[in-house]
Image (cartoon, helix red, strand yellow):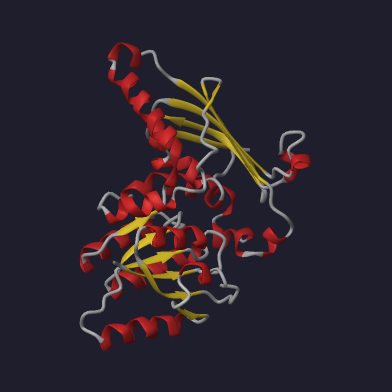
C-alpha cells in the first residue's frame, strides 16, 4: 500500500483522483485546499489530515517523515489551478515523492526542462494524466493508423482530414474563477483543449504548422498541420455554440472528432479513466514529462499567436 497526499482536494477533478487512489488499494494520508468544502473525503478517506494552508500541509508531511524513519510519502497528486502545478511538483520532488499531476503539467514549456533536471537530482518521476491515451477505442484507432502507415505504398497517399469540436458550456462563474484568468489557467486552449491536442498529436504525429483564426476569452478556433493529418479545431465554453436542441435535453457538453468525415466515438468513458492511469503509473508505465511536452509547447504557441494584419 502506497501513501498519497493530494493538493487541490476541493477542486472539480479531485474526486476522480480519490476514486483512483482507493480503487488501486492505496491510502491518502493528507490533503490540502484553501477552500474547505471537502466533504467528499468522507466517501473515500475520512481519516486523512486536511489543511487549508499549504505551509501547514508542508509542515505535517515533514513531521511525519521525522517522526518515523519507516514513513515515506510515495506520491503527491496535484489537482490545483494550473499556475500552481510547477511549484507543487517541485515541493513533491524535494519531499522525496513521485508526482501525479493533472494536465497541463506546467503553463510554459521551459519549466519542463527544470523539472527534468529535478527528476534526475532527486531520483523521482513526474507523471501526468493523459487519460485519452488509455481509452480502449482510441488505443484501437491508433493501432489501425499505425498499421496503415506501416504500409509504405498506402502511407505515401494517406493524409487524413480531421475536424475537432469541443463545446463545454460554462456559466458566469467561470470568468470569476481561476479558470477564467489566463495568467492562472492558460486560457481556453490550455485549460479546455490540451487533452484533445495531446490526443491529436499522439494519433497523427508532430506539429508541422499551426494557425489561430479566432481567439476570444470564451472560444478559439484554428488549423493544425500534423505529420499525418490536417486539422480544423474549435473550442468553446459558450452555450450558444452548442448544436441545436442539446440544451433542451440538459446536455451542456458536445465533443466531436471526425476522421475523414467519420465520427470517432470516445464519449463513453471520457471521464472514468483516472483509475486506469493510476494503475499504469503504479506498474511503471505512466506518461511523463516528455509525453506531455508536445501539447504544452503547442498550446503555449496558440495562446501567444499573433495574426498577420
Picture coordinates of residue 199 (x, y %)?
Answer: 44, 39
* Res. 132 in view: yes
Instruction: Decide if residue 283 is on the left or right side of residue 156.
Output: left
User: Residue drawn 25% across and 64% down?
Assistant: 124
Given the current orientation, which residue lies at the most extreme top position? Answer: 153
Residue 289 in sight from this viewpoint? no
Q: Is residue 93 left or right of residue 258?
A: left
Could you say where residue 261 lies in the image, as x and y percent from the top left? 56, 20
Q: Is residue 150 above or below residue 221?
A: above
Of 24 and 112, the residue lying toward us = 24
Which residue is rendered at x = 45% and y = 26% of the image?
Answer: 229
Tell me which corner region of the image, top left, top right, bottom left or bottom right, holds residue 205.
Answer: top left
Q: Residue at x 43, y 19 (%)?
A: 159
Specify the quadrant that holds the C terminus: top right
Q: State left or right for residue 164 relative to residue 115.
A: right
Q: Is residue 303 above or below residue 30?
A: above
**Residue 196 % position (x, y):** 50, 41
In the rendered view, tell whether residue 159 sits above or below residue 178: above
Point out residue 30 in the picture as x, y percentages from the top left corner. 42, 76
Residue for point 37% across, 57% down: 110
| Depth order, front residue of 77/309 | 77
Numbered-mark total: 0
Q: Quadrant of residue 90?
A: bottom left
Dividing the image into 4 quarters, which one contains the N terminus? bottom left
Amino acid at each position: 500500500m502506497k501513501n498519497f497526499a493530494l493538493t487541490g482536494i476541493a477542486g472539480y477533478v479531485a474526486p476522480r483522483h480519490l476514486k483512483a487512489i482507493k480503487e488501486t488499494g492505496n491510502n491518502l494520508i493528507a490533503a490540502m485546499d484553501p477552500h474547505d468544502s471537502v466533504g467528499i473525503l468522507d466517501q473515500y478517506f475520512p481519516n486523512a489530515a486536511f489543511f487549508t494552508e499549504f505551509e501547514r500541509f508542508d509542515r505535517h508531511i515533514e513531521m511525519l517523515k521525522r517522526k518515523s524513519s519507516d514513513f515515506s510519502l510515495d506520491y503527491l497528486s496535484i489537482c490545483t489551478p494550473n499556475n500552481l502545478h510547477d511549484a507543487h511538483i517541485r515541493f513533491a520532488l524535494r519531499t522525496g515523492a513521485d508526482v501525479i499531476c493533472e494536465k497541463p503539467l506546467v503553463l510554459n514549456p521551459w519549466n519542463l526542462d527544470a523539472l527534468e533536471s529535478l527528476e534526475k537530482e532527486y531520483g523521482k518521476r513526474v507523471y501526468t494524466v493523459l487519460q485519452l491515451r488509455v481509452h480502449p477505442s482510441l488505443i484501437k484507432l491508433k493501432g489501425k493508423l499505425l498499421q496503415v502507415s506501416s504500409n509504405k505504398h498506402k502511407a505515401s497517399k494517406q493524409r487524413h482530414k480531421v475536424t475537432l469540436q469541443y463545446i463545454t458550456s460554462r456559466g458566469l462563474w467561470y470568468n470569476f474563477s481561476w479558470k477564467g484568468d489566463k495568467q492562472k489557467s492558460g486560457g481556453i486552449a490550455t485549460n479546455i483543449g490540451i487533452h484533445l491536442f495531446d490526443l491529436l498529436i499522439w494519433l497523427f504525429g508532430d506539429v508541422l504548422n499551426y494557425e489561430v483564426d479566432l481567439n476570444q476569452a470564451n472560444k478559439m478556433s484554428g488549423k493544425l498541420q500534423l505529420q499525418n493529418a490536417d486539422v480544423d479545431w474549435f473550442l468553446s465554453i459558450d452555450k450558444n455554440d452548442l448544436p441545436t436542441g442539446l440544451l433542451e435535453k440538459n446536455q451542456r457538453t458536445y465533443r466531436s472528432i471526425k476522421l475523414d468525415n467519420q465520427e470517432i466515438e470516445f464519449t463513453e468513458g471520457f471521464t472514468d479513466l483516472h483509475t486506469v492511469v493510476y494503475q499504469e503509473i503504479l506498474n511503471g508505465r505512466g506518461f511523463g514529462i516528455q509525453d506531455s511536452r508536445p501539447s504544452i509547447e503547442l498550446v503555449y504557441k496558440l495562446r501567444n499567436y499573433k495574426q498577420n494584419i
